[in-house]
Image (spheres, rainbow, N blue to C red):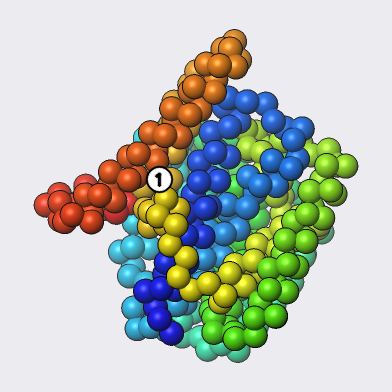
């Protein structure tokens, strides 16, 4: 296998997810698109791509004798904590955004790769699916989430646990272990099939995934969905027919990676290579947008603000990539680079 080329395609896919994520995260603060279910499905594509590739690349690195470094895993979790504390001014390890999931999932895969073989992973996969079905049927899913005020903890140090934080991590937070770790584990297991040669089968996989997405567009445009706070993605919660979306994404990714091993569209590849930095910037901009009431702004001003935030994130990411490519980044202290996600 030509590993560098394989990474080009993965960076390309991750870059597309970053671009969708930036638009999807910023849009709710500027526009009201809750009735545009086609857009909501497009916005929902980013997370399954990130999460599946987290499992896929972790397994890829392990089997190419480049196992995921623990320091990189904790970097992802630390940046999630920094975003909660300094950007959103909320208690960390409470609502569990996607970085918590990716960090925790990579840590679990790190342990599984050391002590479990493929059969055990498959057993764990079906065990997790069974637990998820149980949770979906018998436990109440809290649709509305609220941040935890630090003053509450001063008065009652045990309120963190009594408020159901563990349940948020396992089942009904923004990105709980159930069912999202199932997607990560599928990504890890599917790495074994990264050298499929049957082009007809791969085209069929992609076509099946695209057909499923088209079906969801028609289905959801005939259905009303409540927006979970300011997020337009359709998978809150992820169960039932909504599970078809990450499955469709998986089919498309597997087909694309095996058919096209060297996709290098510079714009998306650079975003993909610096996805953690772009995510951090996006969170900062969204917190700024959240602090302003834009309802009274004209549409021209809203579009201008939206484009300004989008271009700033993209340009800053490209500047970072330029510094890295020229070697200037090596002169910057490690701690700063670590906290910047580089």
- Residue at position x 65%, y 85% in the image: 198
Q: Position of residue 301 (x, y in %)?
A: 52, 16
Question: Quadrant location of residue 279?
Answer: top left
Q: Position of residue 111 (x, y in %)?
A: 44, 77
Element marked by disc 1: helix
- Residue at position x 52%, y 65% in the image: 53
Q: Tell me if 317 is positioned left or right of 96 in this view.
A: left
Q: Residue furthest left?
A: 331
Instruction: Read off the residue under disc 1.
Output: 278
Q: How many marks?
A: 1
The vertical placement of 122 against 328, above or below, is below
Q: Position of residue 290 (x, y in %)?
A: 51, 25
- Residue at position x 44%, y 73% in the image: 6
The vertical placement of 159 against 257, above or below, is above
The vertical placement of 89 against 79, above or below, is above
Q: Nearer the viewer, residue 288 or 78?
A: 288
């Amino acid at each position: 296998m030509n590993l560098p080329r394989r990474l080009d395609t993965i960076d390309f896919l991750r870059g597309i997810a970053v671009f969708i994520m930036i638009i999807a995260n910023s849009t709710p603060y500027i526009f009201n698109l809750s009735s545009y279910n086609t857009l909501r499905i497009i916005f929902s594509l980013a997370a399954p791509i990130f999460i599946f590739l987290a499992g896929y690349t972790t397994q890829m690195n392990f089997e190419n004798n480049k196992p995921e470094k623990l320091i990189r895993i904790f970097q992802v979790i630390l940046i999630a904590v920094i975003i909660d504390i300094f950007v959103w001014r909320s208690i960390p390890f409470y609502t569990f955004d996607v970085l918590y999931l990716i960090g925790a999932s990579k840590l679990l895969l790190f342990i599984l790769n050391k002590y479990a073989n493929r059969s055990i992973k498959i057993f764990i996969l079906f065990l997790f699916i069974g637990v998820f079905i149980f949770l979906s049927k018998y436990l109440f899913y809290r649709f509305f989430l609220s941040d935890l005020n630090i003053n509450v903890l001063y008065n009652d140090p045990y309120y963190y646990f009594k408020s159901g934080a563990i349940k948020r991590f396992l089942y009904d937070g923004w990105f709980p272990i159930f069912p999202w770790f199932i997607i990560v584990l599928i990504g890890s297991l599917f790495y074994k099939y990264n050298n499929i040669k049957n082009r007809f089968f791969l085209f069929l996989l992609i076509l099946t995934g695209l057909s499923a997405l088209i079906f969801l567009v028609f289905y959801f445009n005939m259905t009303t969905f409540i927006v979970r706070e300011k997020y337009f993605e359709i998978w809150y919660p992820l169960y039932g027919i909504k599970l078809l979306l990450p499955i469709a994404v998986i089919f498309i990714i597997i087909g694309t990676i095996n058919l096209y091993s060297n996709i290098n569209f510079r714009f998306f590849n650079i975003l993909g290579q610096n996805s953690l930095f772009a995510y951090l910037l996006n969170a900062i901009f969204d917190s700024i947008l959240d602090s302003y009431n834009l309802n009274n702004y004209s549409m021209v001003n809203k579009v201008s603000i939206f484009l300004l935030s989008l271009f700033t994130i993209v340009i800053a990411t490209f500047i970072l990539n330029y510094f890295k490519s020229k070697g200037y980044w090596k002169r910057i202290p490690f701690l700063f680079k670590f906290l910047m996600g580089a």
